[in-house]
Amino acid sequence: MEKAKITVKDVTKIFGKSPKHATKLLDQGKSKSEILKETGNTVGVNRASFDVYPGEIFVIMGLSGSGKSTLVRLLNRLIEPTSGQVLIDDEDIVRMKPEQLRDVRRKKLSMVFQRFALFPHKTVLENTEYGLEVQNISKEKRSGKAQESLELVGLKGYEKSYPSELSGGMQQRVGLARALANDPDVLLMDEAFSALDPLIRKDMQDELLELQESMEKTIVFITHDLDEALRIGDRIALMKDGSIVQIGTPEEIMTNPANDYVERFVEDVDLSKVLTASHVMKRAETLRADRGPRVALQLMREQKLSSLYIVDKKQKLIGVITADDAAKAIEEKKEITDILITDLPTVTPDTLLTDMFVKMASSSLPLPVIDENDKFKGIIVRGAVIGALAGNETESAKGEVS
Amino acid sequence: MQLFPKIPLADWVDSFVDMLTDNLEPVFDGITSGIDWFVEGIVSILAFPPALVLIAIFTILAWWSSRWPVAIFTLLGLLLIDNLGYWDPTIETLALVLTSVIISIILGVPLGIWASQSDRVRGIITPVLDFMQTMPAFVYLIPAILFFGIGMVPGIIASVIFAMPPTIRLTNLGIRQVPEDLIEASNAFGSTTKQKLIKVQLPLATPTIMAGINQSIMLSLSMVVIASLVGAPGLGADVYRAVTQIKVGIGFEAGLAIVILAIMLDRISQNIGKTKN
């Protein structure tokens, strides 16, 4: 496996006057509420461990009070950890001297805040420059970089506005631009979109994913919204009472919840927004285009199929033929290429079920799945989609795909 | 019959003050001549232009910082003071107030900043400020005479002691009231304590600090009559004289001049604080 960008090892945060005593009780396996009762200390984060890999969006999700916002602040030491290690590029943040920590914050870690945390007395450009300004970078150089970063988030032309003149969505774009201006390796996003309207939130999620395509930052994203977590997360860590309950890809968490808590959490989720084409795809019979219609018809009869997918030598999908057309072609002495239906809607293995409904409705034939190299991977039949949405185990379908 | 003998607090204070007078005389002399020089400077600057020119300048200042009603009030008020023949004492009082306020700012803002950075410092400063504000002003006039003699300087010292606390308190408050997420943002981008203070906390605290300075101006104006007890010249001295001679009319005239000055300074300083924001 790839080398981790951030490694968090047994990080614990106890709020209160006797953290040592509370840590001991934690080691004895006492719960958060028992420790609060016994010592008056609050367990913020309980021995959290995880790795974040370069270029991934790692979502930490939990309800309010689960310790997720505390956990993200332990990563850049806005809150001092009580114990444990936070390694960024193998350097332990927790042991760093103030100057070293400042340097890491200036160059490697940026943060985006829930309530935007823009400086009201500074213009949009000055806000964006802030991370560079504290590094004493010259005025021209930093405003150039800030300008680029504002263009990236689509705020060109607003440089001289003040944050109070912008809408919430635009303010958070400034927050994002400010975090990107010093070109950090890691973005920490603390409920960055939670204060926005649902529609704007979705736009911002899309935009973040789009930006991420080209930036490939390592992103730690905090949210209490499971839909958001499933939408943008490459992997998700679920937190409860300061502990991490499960870490996995969205599909792993949905299809294989680690315990009752996770199960209850995910039971209301719209599966069509989580499951992808690869989950419900089936293997399909294919035939090369240089074979005749007789061969095709023979194959369809043997396999009891009503249609057959035609590919070239590189497994690239050319089109589909139906059994009726093949029979007619034999009578009229036509070639396969004459009866080929090439105008087919297709999806990729990563397409979410919710995004393929329209395409399925527009065609009576199964939906072909094509990967990024145009290779034909399989087909999706309606029954499998309905089965998956009903929560049926889809492992068997998955197993058939080569 | 007392259970315990009376604690000789008065004797202790006396001998402490004696000790200070004996040992720190050069220091007090230095402070006295420094402040004296400063006040004289302000008086001679303010007295240099003819009254009408100064009135015009203040009117323009009022118009620039506030709206036109304040400017009209300033113009008419100052013309009335000049007409009643209180121009010179008004300038002396203005110099006294300005000097006290400038000293209050020079000492008070840094102390307020210091208090905002540490709970321990705030814990020490707060009761001292309570003491300064509640101890009757007449009481510290006495050591002020011993240390700084008679005249403008002990009056200014007494005014500073009484007028400085709001500046300290509100500087501390203004900095502490800066929203936590802005402090976090500032820290998260790797600011030093000084950068955070200069680039984030002080600019955001400015309206509150200006409110404190405004309070200091008003409190030092309220001290002008008391300051005249130790020989500070100005409108306060006129009021004091009118009281001792039971001259109601003169007392009213001088008092009215103080009120006009107070309203003018209050409005101008308040609005400067607002326009800065």
Image (cartoon, coloured by chain):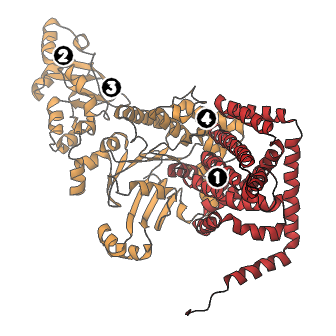
Chain colours: A orange, B red
Quickly name the residue at label 1.
B197
Earlier in the chain: of badge 4 and badge 3, it is 4
Nearer to us of marks 2 and 1 is 1
Q: Can residue B143 be seen here?
A: yes
In this rendering, the label closer to the viewer, 2 or 4: 4
Q: Measured along the vertical axis of the image, is residue A98 above or below residue A276?
A: below
Kind of residue at badge 4: Leu
The residue lying at 33 percent from left, 25 percent from top is A316
Tell me the kind of residue under disc 3: Lys
- Calculate the distance from the C-alpha at mark 4 to the C-alpha at mark 3: 49 Å
Q: What kind of element bears circle 4?
A: helix
- A395 or B263: nearer the eye? B263
Amino acid, disc 2 = Pro
The CA distance from mark 1 to mark 3 is 63 Å
Secondary structure at numbered mark 2: helix
Tag 1: Cα neighbours inside 10 Å, few (<14), some, or many (≥20)?
A: some
Q: Which mark is residue A316?
A: 3
Q: Nearer the viewer, residue A92 or A266?
A: A266
Callout 3: residue from which chain? A
Task: Quote the CA–CA distance across marks 2 and 4.
Answer: 66 Å
Marks 2 and 4 share the same chain: yes
Where does label 4 land, which residue?
Answer: A125
Q: Nearer the viewer, mark 4 or mark 1?
A: 1
Indicate which disc residue B169 carries: none
Residue at numbered disc 2: A293
Q: Nearer the viewer, mark 1 or mark 3?
A: 1
Q: Residue at x 45, y 35 (%)?
A: A168
Chain letter, disc 1 residue: B
Distance from the alpha carbon under mark 4 to that under mark 1 = 20 Å
Q: Residue at x 70, y 41 (%)?
A: B260
